[in-house]
Amino acid sequence: MDILISIPFLVFFPMLASFFIMSPLFTNNEISIRRFSKSIFGFIFLYTIFLLVMFDTANPFISKISFFGLDWIQALGVQFSFKIDGIGMILVLLTSFIFFISAISSKMNIRKNHKFYYSMLLLLMSAILGIFTASDMFVFFMFWELELIPAYFLIGGDFSLETNTEAKKSAIKFVLFTFLGSMVMLLGILLLHYYSYMTSQTLTANFSEIFTERIPVIIKLIISACFIIGFGVKLPIIPLHTWLPDAHTNAPTPISMVLAGIMLKTGAYGIFRFNYQIMNDVFQIFAPVLAIFALVNIIYTAFVAYAQTDIKRIVAYSSISNMGLILLGLCAFNQIGLNASVFHMTAHGLVTAGLFMICGIVYLRCKTRDINTLGGIASNMPRLFGLATLIVLASIGVPAFAPFISEVLTVISAMFSNLGIVLKVSAIVALPLLIISSCYMLKFLHCGFMGEKQEAFAKINDITTHEFIVLASVVAGLLLFGIFPSALLGMIG
Amino acid sequence: MEELISENLYLIILLPLWIFLILMLGRFFAVYINKTLTHALTLLSSAMGVIATLGLYKFFTPDKIYEYSYPFLKINDFVVPFGIHIDRMSLMFTSVLFFVSLLIQLFSISYMKDKKKQYRFFALLNLFNFSIAGLFLSPNLFQTYVFWELAGVVSYLLIGFDYDQFKKSVAAKKVFIINRIGDTAFLAGITMSSYFLYEYAPVKSLASLSFFDINTSSVLIGAYTSRPLFLIICWLFLTAAIVKSAQLPFYTWLQDAMEAKLPVSALLHSSTLVALGIYLTLRLLPFYTLAPIVLKSATVIGILTAFVCSLSACSQTDMKKTLAYSTSAQFGLMFFAIGVLNIKAAIALFCAHALIKPMLFITIPNENEKWNYTNFVLFLIGGLSLSGVLFLGMLSKEIFVYSLGTTGKTLVTILSFLTAFYITRIALVATDKNGLEKGNVNIIEILSISGFLILNIGIYVYLRKIGVYKIAEPFWAAITAWISVYILYTKQGFYKIPFIYPLCHEGFYLDKLYMTVVVGTYNKIAKLSDLFETKIFSNYKPALLFSKCGVKTVCWIEENVMNRAVSAIVSFSRQVSTISKQLQTKNVQWYNLYGFMIITAIISCLVLAYIAFLAYIEGVG
């Protein structure tokens, strides 16, 4: 069976498929492009489930590519190596699932340039899978940068029938922000690599082999700060977040799902890998400060979300708020916090994908996203309304859904943390999120759907089977992890 | 037999959940559900609950506890078990719950006769039963919290059942958000107490806050924390309880919950949502007994709520609103009883209220319809019982007053007077407004009302037999109120006191205060943060200006320094070239002359340099 388990295959297969679709060999027929790429996404999803079945927390999957028996960049000791441990496995599964459902939902939203769109989507998936599986800093960085290219084209591209001039602007904004962040991150990687070599005389960039004990504390602080700024752009941590609402609002629906569902989690994953694991002694100094930033994320954006009138912007700000919760879990720096954080990555990935899907469906039918003009569509769309109610309730942390478990665990972990009074206080300060989040999410539900019927929306149809499958699978996932949380927590270890 | 039921009681709890799933999802899996089957399944689950809990009640002596749990969440040594915990108190609450909901479900069959979406309504009723029963049988505070939240959500779904009516959906939202305040306080309390046990207690399993060890846990938490912190923890738990039980200053949500359908109101107000606060307070009594000041504050809150809500109820003209205020007032009385540690009285008051309130709700007339004679009489019987003149209502007040001092007796007496006052008054107002008629009565309604009445009388007779209580002051106060209100009303003797009447009528302006001050502040903060977001964070003008300045500086340097330098070089070389052009005469002799001059110059330079070099060496030497 071992021969079937191959991480390079998992990472590079979508890339090859992307090149294949892009090449002139492939047909220009819209339907066959869609079906082909959907089958690729489905296959990758099934393959990750197969990996999950074969997975054992004690021995993570490890693999290495050598070029003619040599390392990738021999002079720097950089190896093209991959590793999937428990957390990586969960995120890989989440990635393949969200990409699969966003590919299904692309049918309704993408009307032009199919060839380009699907090949870019596959390339993006390949890059993100690479981020979650890379076990070498430089390989990680390569995939981190590779992700920008398809993301830029997907956010700013011209895929729907009406033209959106804002989309290109926000795509440029996204790329500029992320690129500046990753430059700072690269500085951190180079410093870490250099000092690790200078102090231990072993030339390596592997996460598990890199040696940080003898690096002077001041250098470690600088390196950690570089990483926090670099990943803080993606996460996003508050002053660095302004690219997010624009990019999420102007991107096509499936891309918003992917951006909020997975792309933001790469930032949290980076902080976990680099700061939490490699620079763990310095992270204890940074954690209380970061916890305050996380609190600002949680409370401030929740208020901003309440003031929005565009339903997609409400969801975008709510995801910043939830990313703050993930950061708070990491800052607690204990086992419960790590579990809560990874659990919330999964739970929030599912919830936010579902919410963006709902926004997309409403926009397709009603041609507006303004909360003041929407309303009264619940009786026309009972199926959508039922599923939307479930997902909104899940997002505000209702028992039996996954976010409930992670919200409660995050608060507990911050309270149980050994890193001083700041985290204990922040556990209590973060709690009003329960009230504020229910305020804006219920506003979303009530103003978006409920209320008296309107003339303008009298003739809209209920959701199609495609859309139903997407939303129902999201709800099923949320219920699964909400009722059996130990299924996920067992893997984090 | 006893063990068999105890071990399988969780199946009884899961039965409503299972029926909820059948009713909601059965349509998708080709299971045909007709109305009769829906009703039968719903009634079956509640009836099973009644039988099982009443059957067990006999076996459980006051100190017997049965507990079964499995680890739901396990992270290293932090374990949260889920399961069931059966003792006298949980059985009492569960049996009252199942009994009341059985009778109310019976009533809903007639109430929902011509209405749409019946399957959803009955499914939600089942889910509600599941969440409340799961809470009453929770083995620890974590599971209690889970079901506490679930109960809030299901009540939100039930209140906002008609989602296309704007007013109802807004009311549901308001109820949910106010309840969330209590949930937050509850979670904060749980987290803090769990932390102290996890960090300091000798056994890590205590951190799950099991009810089995609640006495030990409370003493340990009291020992490990400083006094103010312990008081804060207790107050957090008390806040959770008073929000759910609609006490001051959070009672306004109960008036909004009145937008729900009649059976839902009857259920919310009797044995389900508001009962949770009383249940939690009774469960956490070991905490409160260690902090007498918290008990005192519970007493004060209870008495204040009872007075404020009774006075408000006295001035209402809408029957449903009166009943809503009356619920808060009655639960205030229960908190009063718990505050003075009269547990027996609190439970008696709770049972009496749980059996009387649904009866009052079922018998009130629909808007703009005439009132049935039968219903009118039954309403009066219920009202008499609630105000302490008949049956269990009387007995519970007797039990309560029995142990009180003079002040307490006076307070309860005044409250009984007020209760009787508002019930009589509203009955008279409604008969005036709607009028009485000898209409047909629905047999199912009568069945459910008689169920409440029979249980009310039955428990009364049973308790009278085993205990000796004297008829107390509240009885006489209530009788006086009934008579005086009747006389005053028939003589048109009511007078609206100028300042106090509007104050009471608007519920002491608490709701308006919240809507303007709290919601207004919230909106202001949201607007302000949005402004901050757009004007400061998303404002790139400074950055753009800065980069423009940079570009301009570079352009200026490019233009004025670099370009000038280059052009200076160009013009210089051009001048050189014009001079050299003049030298080009196309004459070989001239060229030879140039060559000769240049070579002579070079050689002379070399010679001169050589001489200088030699002189330098000599000088050095």
Image (tube, coloured by chain):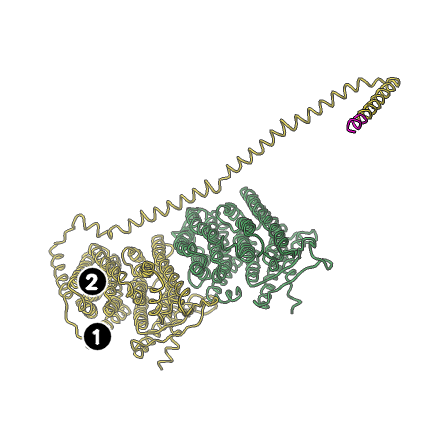
Q: Mark 1: few, some, or many residues within 10 Å (few <14, many ≥20)?
A: some
The quarter of the picture where residue B189 lies is bottom left
| Chain A shade | green
Is there any visible trace of residue B440 in the rendered image? no
Q: Residue furthest front?
A: B621
Q: Amino acid at mark 1?
A: Leu
* Mark 2 or 1, nearer chain start: 2
- Which label sits on residue B463? 1
- Place of residue A256 in the rendered image (x, y in percent of width and height, measured from the top left): 53, 51
- Place of residue A115 in the rendered image (x, y in percent of width and height, measured from the top left): 63, 51
Q: Mark 2: few, some, or many residues within 10 Å (few <14, many ≥20)?
A: some
- The magenta-colored residue range is B613-621
- Tell me which chain the residue with mark 2 is part of: B
**Relative side of B375 to A288, left or right:** left
Q: Amino acid at mark 2?
A: Glu
The quarter of the picture where residue B58 lies is bottom left
Relative to the observer, which residue lies in front, B57 or B438?
B57
- Which label sits on residue B437? 2
Q: Residue furthest bottom?
A: B1
Q: Quadrant of the N terminus of chain A?
A: bottom right
For residue A221: magenta? no
Relative to the observer, which residue lies in front, A35 or A272?
A272
State which chain is coloured yellow.
B
Question: What residue is shown at x 35% (from left), y 56% (from top)?
Answer: B181
Question: What residue is shown at x 57% (from left), y 68% (from top)?
Answer: A58
